[in-house]
């Protein structure tokens, strides 16, 4: 949907993406506090806002904003100050290609899936910048661990996406959703099935594991392992800059969940809804599917212990990458054969 | 065409907006006294060149530069530097005597001259119309695996050789135990 004015369009799209990020990050933070508490038999936030502690994320945000913005004396100030922006920019840029409806996409790049992987790899750079410029050994160790982990899990992530691209025959995310909405005829019935049901179950599992690792969330949170590294590359950050990292983490959780919804769960498509209505119900459908993935990630977080560094690297290099390579072979075989 | 005419085109302003930071960052890469800072300037330079590719409608090449160079090569540079030493201050051993600087400067100027000469010689002032839309990735894939398949495989062979060479250089074989 375009109004014909380039700058107006761009402004509206950027505003929507920012609104999306903030508007969704707060509920997800609240959901994490509450869901984790219930899973671990605790009460969680209780008093803020009067009922169920609903205002807790807002209170936390205000707390961060009114703190002092510290820069360590030995730190490389310009790099230290730029690092949060690099991380958050890489996250926001993911929203550009995610389709919320047949016409509701900021820019339907022909290279959608490739762009997504390229732009999200920039976030690693921000993490390394933060780790190095803090002039703190904990930060440096955390940054290094984070980078080693992000590189290791970027490969399975990329290979899982590649398997989907092979089946869909296009890298455009809208094209991938359309490929999933095409009807498959089995005997007398003809249905549209998402890729997770038509042979991408292994890619789906690999993608979700690699995604949790890319987000550095428990059980893959070695980079900020509190018990040994204080807070990893976030140790020296405070105030607004810390909350930017924090926000970026939740925003990329949402963004990657929406990517999973698009690649494997059929995106904005729902069966039995007329084509013309998809632009209206599409956003809710994508968000609903993404919410399932977010819940799953929170569930993993509250029930699994942390992986050791060598276990973490073994899982990526010895298991996920070989499995995804075989997976691609099998899927390309069927893509050619059928 | 005068400079004034050249500046009336908005695309040329976009070019300058990208090219000047790329140029400045490239100079800073070699003149910076801090290793990590130099790598970070290299990121800006590479980002600028990726953006120039995007401006020319070569989306695939542009994003490949981002994914491969910024996303992988630079990250490995940074990990390498930070694992061995990551000085926050200026490194003294980065400054070389003029006898080392002069040949390097001469070589880069020569290389620039050769490339510039080759471009002017083959295209001159001819205006090449940009494609209306970005090149479709499917077409690039087809041409790589049909007309250019042998060069493509040769390049992958070079990479394989580099990989094996790296392993051979890095690994230390323990001498066999002599009873």
Image (spheres, coloured by chain):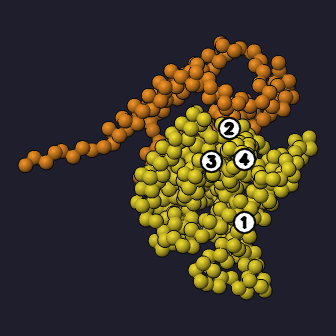
In the structure shown, which secondary structural element does the residue marked by tag 2 occupy? loop
Crowding around mark 4 (Cα neighbors within 10 Å: few <14, some 14 to 19, many 20+) is few
Q: In this image, B104 relative to B25: left or right?
A: left
Q: Nearer the viewer, residue B69 or A104?
A: A104
- For label 2, the residue is A170
Structural distance between the alpha carbons of marks 2 and 1? 30 Å
Local crowd size for mark 2, using a 10 Å CA cut-off: few (<14), some (14–19), many (≥20): some
Q: The chain coloured orange carries which letter?
A: B
| Chain under callout 3 | A
Q: Earlier in the sequence, mark 3 or mark 2?
A: 2
- Residue at image point 58% right, 57% down: A208
Output the letter for the chain in yellow. A
Q: Residues within 10 Å of mark 3 (few under 14, many from 20)?
A: few
Residue that carries the numbered disc 3 in the rendered image:
A198
The numbered mark 2 sits on a residue in which chain? A
Residue pointed to by mark 1: A25
At 87% from the left and 41% from the top, the residue drawn is A6
The verdict on a common chain for dots 2 and 1 is: yes
Q: Mark 1 lies on which chain?
A: A
From the viewer's perspective, is A70 left or right of B76?
right
The Cα–Cα distance between marks 4 and 3, rounded to whole angstroms, is 15 Å
Disc 1: CA contacts within 10 A as few (<14), some (14-19) or many (>=20): many
Q: Both on one chain, marks 3 and 2? A: yes
Residue A103 in sight in this render? yes
Label 1 SS: helix
Q: Are marks 3 and 2 in contact (CB under 8 Å)?
A: no
For the residues beneath circles 2 and 4, the answer to whether they share a chain is yes
Name the mark nearer the viewer: 4 or 1. Answer: 4
Tag in front: 2 or 1: 2
Q: How many labels does the image show?
A: 4
Instruction: Say which residue label 4 marks.
Output: A189
């Amino acid at each position: 949907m375009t109004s014909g004015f380039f700058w107006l369009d761009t402004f509206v799209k950027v505003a929507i993406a920012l609104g999306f990020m903030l508007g969704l990050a707060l509920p997800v933070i609240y959901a994490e506090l509450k869901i984790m508490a219930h899973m671990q038999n605790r009460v969680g936030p209780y008093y803020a806002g009067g009922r169920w502690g609903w205002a807790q994320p807002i209170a936390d945000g205000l707390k961060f904003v009114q703190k002092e913005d510290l820069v360590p004396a030995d730190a490389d100030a310009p790099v230290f100050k730029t690092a949060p922006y690099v991380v958050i920019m890489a996250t926001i840029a993911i929203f550009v290609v995610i389709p919320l409806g047949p016409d509701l996409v900021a820019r339907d790049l022909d290279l959608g899936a490739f762009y997504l992987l390229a732009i999200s790899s920039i976030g690693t750079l921000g993490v390394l910048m933060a780790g190095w410029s803090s002039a703190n050994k904990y930060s440096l160790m955390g940054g290094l661990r984070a980078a080693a982990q992000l590189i290791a899990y970027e490969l399975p992530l990329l290979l899982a996406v590649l398997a989907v691209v092979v089946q869909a025959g296009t890298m455009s995310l809208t094209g991938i959703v359309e490929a999933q909405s095409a009807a498959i005829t089995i005997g007398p019935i003809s249905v549209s099935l998402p890729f997770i049901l038509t042979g991408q179950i292994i890619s789906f599992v690999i993608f979700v594991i690699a995604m949790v690792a890319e987000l550095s969330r428990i059980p893959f949170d070695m980079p900020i392992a509190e018990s040994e590294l204080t807070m990893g590359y976030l140790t020296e950050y405070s105030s607004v800059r810390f909350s930017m990292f924090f926000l970026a983490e939740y925003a990329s959780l949402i963004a990657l969940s929406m990517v999973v919804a698009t690649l494997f769960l059929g995106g904005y498509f729902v069966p039995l809804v007329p084509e013309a209505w998809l632009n209206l119900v599409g956003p809710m459908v994508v968000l609903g599917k993404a919410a399932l993935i977010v819940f799953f990630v929170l569930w993993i977080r509250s029930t699994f212990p942390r992986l050791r560094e060598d276990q973490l690297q073994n899982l990526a290099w010895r298991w996920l990458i070989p499995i995804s390579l075989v997976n691609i072979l099998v899927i390309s075989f069927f893509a050619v054969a059928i | 065409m005068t400079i004034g005419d050249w500046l009336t085109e908005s695309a040329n302003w976009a070019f300058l907006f990208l090219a000047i930071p790329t140029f400045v960052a490239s100079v800073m890469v070699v003149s910076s006294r801090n290793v990590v800072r130099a790598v970070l300037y290299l990121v800006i330079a590479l980002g600028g060149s990726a953006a120039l590719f995007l401006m020319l409608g070569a989306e695939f090449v542009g994003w490949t530069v981002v994914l491969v160079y910024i996303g992988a090569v630079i990250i490995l540079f940074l990990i390498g530097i930070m694992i061995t030493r990551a000085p926050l201050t200026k490194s003294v051993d980065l400054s070389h005597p003029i006898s080392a600087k002069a040949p390097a400067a001469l070589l880069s100027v020569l290389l620039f001259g050769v490339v510039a000469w080759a471009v002017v010689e083959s295209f001159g002032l001819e205006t090449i119309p940009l494609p209306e839309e970005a090149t479709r990735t499917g077409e690039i894939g087809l041409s790589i695996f049909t007309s250019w398949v042998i060069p493509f495989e040769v390049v992958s062979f070079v990479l394989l050789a580099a990989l094996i060479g790296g392993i051979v250089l890095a690994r230390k074989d323990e001498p066999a135990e002599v009873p």
